[in-house]
Image (cartoon, grey):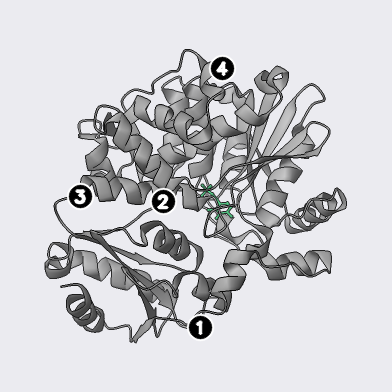
Amino acid sequence: MELFNLKDPSEVVTFSQAVQQGLGRQQGLFFPKNIPTIDDIDSLLAKPFNERSAEILGQFIGDEVDAETLQTMVNNAFQFPAPVAHIADNVYSLELFHGPTLAFKDFGARFMAQCLAQFSKKEKITILTATSGDTGAAVAHAFYGISNIDVVILYPKGMISSLQEKLFCTLGGNIHTVEIDDDFDSCQQLVKDAFDAPEIRDGLHLNSANSINISRLLAQVCYYFEAIAQLPAEKRADAVISVPSGNFGNLTAAMIAKAMGLPIKRFIAATNANDTVPRYLKTGEWQPNKTVATMSNAMDVSAPNNWPRIEALIEFGYIDKASLTGDTVDEDYTQMAVKHLNDLGYLSEPHAGVAYKALKRSIEDDEVGLFLGTAHPAKFKETVENILGTPVALPKELAECANKALLSSQLDSQFESLKAYMLKTLG
Ligand SMILES: *Cc1c(COP(=O)(O)O)cnc(C)c1O
């Protein structure tokens, strides 16, 4: 598969290069030269999730990875289901939180790990990433046990919840977690310093498992097919998908699925108060405000980094602009949505609450609505308990790791300290 840089179309790379490079020149995003279309959607939808997913991904990268290898990669990455739950009447939820770190990012991060393991077979590589909580967990679990890859995750001391810490600092093996005696910005600075230091960057073959990586998006395309496959067949053509959005990777993947021929009638870009996109869709003006903190904190993004890909999907005629609307859901309505879902017998959390509310405001009787459940309610336990006034139980995986010992190292925020640590541990 060939991809080009949206900022500099003369830069053309293979999928393998795009995965290893992340971004193109001038920080440009890679975009497929051609989005394949699928002729017989119904027979594809009839297949089991993993077999179907390998087929979808093969349409893009079959020229670089043979079918058998790709099937193995998919089987290793997608070891958990993406069930659709019927909520009420014509409303359904796509549950993307059954992976090891209880959020949809497991799908993309785990497939990316498989890709990197495949493409960098001959050399050992090091993933270096800073986390304020959730990304670190998805990356740690995705790369855990992959033989030619070491992972170093930096996180700010005392700034993440103890449950979050337990989720990624208890693995050991090839996962090295480092508590930095400073804030998140300082962790991010250390990552940048490492990429600027040839001894580390080249010596340890550094890579950042960045969320704009094309491999993560392609993996996410697969679960939209899985969602439509679970809807009643006669309703498939009327599907409306409401996506709780932050960096807009999830919505980009949904649109790629539609461009391939998956029947989706229209999309709702649902945001919290960080509403750059809904305002842009109404006024045509791109004016990011300062980011504000909300209950749905994984969506607290005001300059979404995947947006240029959505613009490209529209500009190149893959997606009709009229099929996308935006909506903003404030904190009060988010709480009410979580309560309302609970009244319907469905335990939810604020990110899904935003998507559910936006869907309810917009859906017509003859449509079938699907909102994404991007995180497990237990992942936002305290917030959900505050909203509902009832305790939320921890799922088995989380309860088990809560008793394990932390394995992190401690460092100050000097780059020299990190450098010495990395050369000693990984060199
Ligand atoms: C990352 C995340 C989002 C936002 O997804 P994008 O692809 O960045 O738009 C929504 N909900 C949860 C729980 C997330 O972790």
Label 3 residue SS: loop
Label 3 near label 2: C-beta < 8 Å? Answer: no
Question: Is residue 303 among the parts visible in the rendering?
Answer: no
Q: Which residue is mark 4?
A: 42
Q: How far is disc 2 from disc 3 in space, using C-alphas?
A: 16 Å
Mark number, residue 158? 1
Mark number, residue 110? 2
Q: How far is disc 4 from disc 2 in space, using C-alphas?
A: 27 Å
Q: Which residue is mark 3?
A: 120
Q: Is residue 227 left or right of residue 247?
A: right
Label 4 residue SS: helix
Q: Nearer the viewer, residue 210 or 37?
A: 37
Label 1 near label 2: C-beta < 8 Å? Answer: no
Q: Nearer the viewer, residue 422 or 166?
A: 166
Could you tell me the amino acid type at mark 3?
Ser
Q: How far is disc 1 from disc 3 in space, using C-alphas?
A: 35 Å
Label 1 residue SS: loop
